[in-house]
Image (cartoon, grey):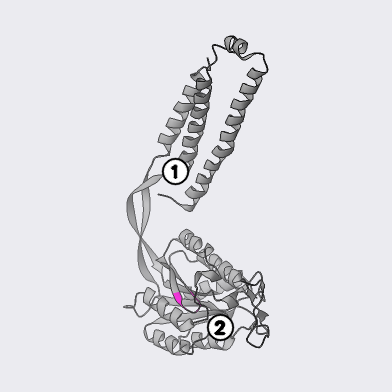
Amino acid sequence: MLTAENILNALWLLIIIPLSFLILFAFRWKKNIISQLGDAPLTSRLIVSFSSKKFLLKNILILSSISFLIIALINFRRADSSEKIKLSGTDLMIALDVSNSMSAKDVQPSRLEKAKLLISKLMDRLAGNRVGLVVFAGAAYLQMPLTTDASAAKLFLSTITPDLVPQQGTNISEALKLCNRSLNTEEKKYKSILLISDGEDHDDASIETAKALKQNGVIINTIGIGSPDGAPIMDAATNDFKHDEQGNVVVSKLNENELKEIARQTNGDYQLLNEAENAANRIQNVLMRMDKKTISDSTLTNYTTYFYWFVLIGLILLIVELLMSER
């Protein structure tokens, strides 16, 4: 079973590359020293007991030993069993705007990065709740289904960039519909959507979608990110600000009115994102006031690990190398 930590540990394998060059250098250095002793026939008689093959074999054993010890760090393991755990909480789908306007820097370091910081802090506060993630621009995509695994959620979150959705624009309505489909549509409570956007919607259907979701028992809380004055949008292709057809710099402004109206339609809460810590606390308090349900989840508990086999092989190879003579 490979995890992000396992993969990072595997990068230690790269240490073998400079070691290989070092051993090759030592081999060539010995040959040069021998050639400086005198004539080749004479030196060959002086070092008749030295075995270049054994010298090479000893170094191969060292490299192999190090390789097995590094592989042991990866900690290959297999899940043997799991147990059901019961939690009390709600289902929350987060709809995150990743359109080009979210790269504006009227919020530092950018609107998108500030939104990701908020979600990360929120994940730390939602133990007992299931959280899913939808990213959207001109289209919406399910980035992560509902899960109680906060570490997995943060891993998905770290990969989000504006390039994740090739179709540009801002289609809030489609994002809300996808969030609704990702929730349990048979229930009329215990579920909510957190919409994080600058509100620059290119579709007029978001308000009607919010009304429909209310009938399904969904509460939509919204987070506005940006400023009413706005900021220019950087074009990654030209490394310059975007311009419209008339040559004017495109300025992206926060549209609070739409985000407030979407929240109002479902009796949800709207807030402007200033401090991520305060915003996460407020969202947590809103969710705590909702009805809770019992959530069953599977948590892997018992593993069979294989690292000690690699350690054993590595140590055996190292002992063999120590006992082996170059003569």
Task: Name the residue: 44% across, 90% down.
Answer: 208
Who is closer to the viewer here, 258 or 33?
A: 33
Looking at the image, is 228 positioned above or below residue 68? Answer: below
Residue at image mark 2: 199
Question: Disc 1 vs disc 2: Cβ atoms closer than 8 Å?
Answer: no
Q: Earlier in the sequence, mark 1 or mark 2?
A: 1
Whether residue 138 is in magenta: the answer is yes
Q: Residues within 10 Å of mark 1 (few under 14, many from 20)?
A: many
Q: Left or right: where does residue 254 sit relative to residue 317?
A: right
Residue 245 is situated, as x and y percent measured from the top left of the image, at: 63, 87
The three-letter amino acid code for the residue at tag 2 is Gly
What SS does tag 1 mark?
loop
Task: Name the residue: 45% across, 83% down.
Answer: 173
Q: Left or right: where does residue 19 sit relative to residue 293?
A: right
Quarter of image, res 296: bottom left
Residue 102 is situated, as x and y percent measured from the top left of the image, at: 59, 75
Residue at image mark 1: 75
Who is closer to the viewer here, 308 or 15?
A: 15
Residue 315 is situated, as x and y percent measured from the top left of the image, at: 47, 29
Q: CA distance from mark 1 to mark 2?
A: 45 Å
What span is colored magenta in the figure?
136-140
What SS does tag 2 mark?
loop
Who is closer to the viewer here, 14 or 208?
A: 14
Who is closer to the viewer here, 117 or 294?
A: 117
Task: Name the residue: 55% across, 76% down.
Answer: 99
Looking at the image, is 269 positioned above or below residue 277? Answer: below
Q: Is residue 159 visible?
A: yes
The three-letter amino acid code for the residue at tag 1 is Asn
Looking at the image, is 12 positioned above or below residue 40? Answer: below
Q: Main secondary structure of the magenta part?
A: loop
